[in-house]
Image (cartoon, coloured by chain):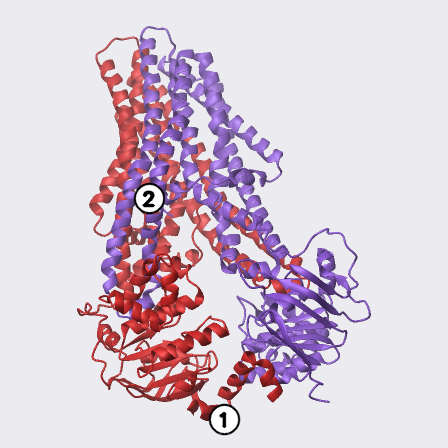
Chain colours: A red, B purple
Amino acid sequence: MTEPTPGTAAEDGAAAGPAGTARTLREVTRGHGGRLALAALAAASAELAGLGLTATAAWLIATAAEQRLIGALGLAIVGVRAFALARGVLRYLERLTGHDVALRALADLRGRVYDALVPRGVRRWRRDDLLNRMSTDVDAVQDLLLRSWLPVAVAGAAGAAAVAVTAFLHPPAALLLAAGLLLAGAVLPPLAAARSAAAAASVARVRAELAVHTGDVLEGAAELAVYGAHDRFAARVAGAGDRLAAAQRRAAGAEALAGAGQILVQGATVLAVALAGIAAVDVIGGVAVVVLGLTALAVFEPLRPLPAALVQLRASRAALRRVVAVLGSAPGEAAAAPGDGGTADPAAVDLRLDDVTVRLDPSRPPALRGVRLDVPAGRRVAVVGPSGAGKSTLIAAVLGEVAPESGTVLLAGRPPAGRPDAELRRLVSGVTQDPHVFQVSLAENLRLARPGATAEQLREAARAAGLLADIDAMPEGFETLPGQDGAQLSGGQRQRLALARALLADPPVLVLDEPTEGLDDELADAVLGDVLAATADRTTLLVTHRLTGLEAVDEIVVLEDGRITQRGGHAELAARPGYFRERLTAEQLARAPLAAAGAD
Amino acid sequence: MTTAEGAARRTPPARGRLLGLLPGGRGHVLAFAAGSTVTAVLIVAQADLLAALLAGGFAGAAPAWPLIAALAAVVCVRAALWFGLEALARRAADAVKARLRTELLDRAQRGGPGWLAGRRRGELVTLATRGLDALDPYVTGYLPALVPAVVVPVAILIRLTAADWGSALIILLTLPLIPVFGALVGAHTRDATLRQWRSLERLGGHFADVVAGLPTLRVFGRARAQAEVVRRIADAHRGATMRTLRIAFLSALVLELVASVSVALVAVPVGLRLLDGQLTLHVALLVLILAPEAYLPLRALGTRFHASAEGLAVAERAFGVIDDETRVAAAPGAAGPPPGARAGGAPAVRLEGVTVRYPGRDRPALAEVSLEIRPGERVALVGPSGAGKSTLLALVLGFARADSGRVLLGGADAAAFTDADWARWRAGLGWIGQRPHLFAGTLAENIALAEPSAPSDAVEAAARAARVDAFAAELPEGYATRLGERGAGLSAGQRQRVALARAVLRDPPLLLLDEPTAHLDGRSEAAVLAATSALLTGRTAVLVTHRPALLAHADRVVTLRDGRIAAARATGSADD
């Protein structure tokens, strides 16, 4: 029923030995050993109380059947009742201590993983898709402890106790019991987990296939309708669904087979132990025979969850290995300087790129080639160009996230790459690609750009970004919660919030990477207008795909295929043939179609 | 998903409908009930045989071989049944998921692209694939536990009544305590949990939120400062969850106590009556073995119910999508005259005072628009974004409905079109949108979307006409190169040319173009424009475009603004 997440099988390679698992477990629960032991103790005690209840009751009944009135009978009656109560209470404690340690380990791991993520570069996060994956991966620590580790510990403790009791009564029976327990607990479950993992690889593959076909039907719905191909593609989804079901059945089948095997082993073991006891009844006595048989029957119950626990273990382990990899590779970096995020002297910070070539991937052509750009203090430069031309790479170079292969980027006279984070952020910040809206109030979303900002400063930044009227219209104003990733905000409001945040940060050099991304034309022009109005006389590097309103900037640079192909003022570029004029004409046509079409 | 989160959800009404999706209807349920009943009988038989074996051994008798053989046989059948019931449950889950997936996609198809545009497709894809897997714990865990929860206690009570009615009475009286206490404690704790639910969700989601926003935090130099907050909130989450769990687990505590104390209640009197010689050891052992077995299925049911809460939430979401009846595109079975889609040789489109409203918008997307497109005529639609151009195309495609007014397609009223009518009408259309979708499959399959059996020379001819041949030659396997999500990536301009080739291959009388070059830059645009111009010759066409090169082909330019026709003007085609 549980199955490894996709990608698990691939990463579940040769290193997946018990030693590796133990190391992963130690690493993700570091500092919680004591509580982990306590949880295991509570869990094992609960199981032992259950076993004690069975064994004592068996002894009580068998002794009573001998119709000898002995004092120990009264003790046994007390024991039966005590074990019964203890089992219930210990179960409760087991659940509490288990969840407590799992949640503590989770909380701690979240902090540690966050610390390890911070020093990594933005590109590293994107490439590894770390940010989307890490929070689910970290959650796996709960499953590892509650659904894998504790059941294994409990089964081990119960098995050992039952073998010890049996050995005390009749050593040969203990050997039989131990053999049965090992088969049902230590052989069948790992076999099932291994078979299920093999099937999980095809589950992951077929699931990806299913997602592709489902995406085809939903995202290509219009094409399929027009070209009458829906039924054909829906059948592909159904086919992939059936293949997925078959693969999942194979994975689950291994677990079911192990479960059936456990029933057989339990039956055979109980029978063997009972027969061994009966054969020696003259030596050990009838009471012992009964206790042996019923103890053997009861001790297999805690073994039942083991196949599922080991399948779960593989899934959690793969996720936690990725977590441990992030923890282990965190580069040591000096702690943040105090005042981090504050503003520096805004005087005369300029930005200069001299013959900059940037290569993001050694196997591919450079993303920027020989780019020269000069943004003197107080001036605004706009970068335009088709998508994929290298505009975002240019921003990344200015923010110090990528170092140029050749040429120099100078921010206030020094290269940004490699400078301490805190210092760099006092010089340059702004709106980056896909700005995140946090699930805290709008005020707190803004304040992360400047922690000490007053209410008046927040209003001022919101006003400059064209967001104040919207916020004032919300019932809770600046205390409004924007929902998960800003779901309660419109696209324009999100972009304006990002802009307000950048204005509030008030860095000496402001970079704005597509502040109108994802907005439709009219709204984009309105937001860009607010951007231009709010950044007058600020040192600004603006990347945009909308050209309307760019008359206001000091220089426009056209970037195509990593090179600057045109530069100049708005009027100058509009007069020359090339990318800028083509796009401008298209934009004007969309705005006033008839007039422009007539003039053409 | 933590246990606490799973336990805290409301109970949705989706349960009954899920049962209706089980495969084979009654047959499957009957097979399951029969298997579970036999299992219950075997549990009793196994206890009986084991009690006999041990009682015999206690008395010093040598074990009888038939007894041993019977015990072994019971164990084997139980194991086999267990495996079979698991497989049956698994198949049920597969069938339920397949049914739901099909219904989701059918719903999407009936709704059409207009319906789909209103929701996040990514979420729908996730729901139809990984999301449905959350149903497994419900269908393979909870549902199969329902039957044993009834038949096992009943079988045990019947056997014990015959053997020792006193013990049976104790079990009979204590068994109902499990569901009763479960419901009482559950109802009490659920309110407490629900009150905490929102704050738990928020605290639990904080880490994901902050991690997803790391790039933003970093650009403002706040990434490190948040580390302390991450720890504080994670700790608060733990504290709040534990407070909830301490109460939630109380119900489990009560159930455990009822079950284990009942065993003690049964065992002690049995022992005392043995002492008096009122009872045989065989019966005493039978009672001792069967008593805990009676409570087991009910306790398992409770556990599995909690584990399946997430699956019910998913089912509720899926049913919500399936039931969403907003803007159903086709009216299946609606009476009306068959559309003469090709009447008069070429299709014509006529709009008579058409108004289209989208839910949740104040302003209509189209307001009282009347327009006629005669066979052979090429009409360009221009106007600012949001003026209604795409909505007008959607009417012709059948992706949108007129709220008032009439849409005549090929002379027939579109309001009366059945699914089959739409299929016939669309068979005469070629459509090129702003962002064509490439399907998983080869380049040739993508071109031959409308006619999968088209001969390869026809496909290649269409490719040449759409200027696809230029880049097809550079692909690793030419027309056999796989495209789509797992295949080679094509540039935006190349995708548009594939879309053109699809239309060329169909050779439709009516061509609909929706800004085919809107997202292209200068160079790729030129190739698309040239290919499109060639395709327009000799066809009826509706062009949404602002490109002079395409406007030149139009006989008329119609300007839309705010959903109304602002101006219409014959161009007298620039070329003549």
* Coordinates of residue B299 in the picture (x, y in percent): 40, 30
**Near-viewer residue (A499 or A11):** A499
Q: Is residue B131 left or right of residue B395?
A: left
Q: Which residue is mark 1?
A: A575
Q: Return the residue found at the far right.
A: B344
Amino acid at circle 1: Ala
Q: Which residue is mark 2?
A: B196
What residue lies at 49% left-to-right and 19% top-to-bottom? B66
Amino acid at circle 2: Gln
* Coordinates of residue B37 in the picture (x, y in percent): 53, 26
What residue lies at 49% left-to-right and 71% top-to-bottom? A520
- Can residue B537 be seen by looking at this rendering? yes
**Near-viewer residue (A260 or B550):** B550
Quarter assignment of residue A183: top left
Host chain of mark 1: A
Q: Is residue B67 above or below residue B510?
A: above
- Can residue A217 be seen by looking at this rendering? no
What residue lies at 42% left-to-right and 91% top-to-bottom? A569
Host chain of mark 2: B
* Coordinates of residue A296 in the picture (x, y in percent): 35, 27
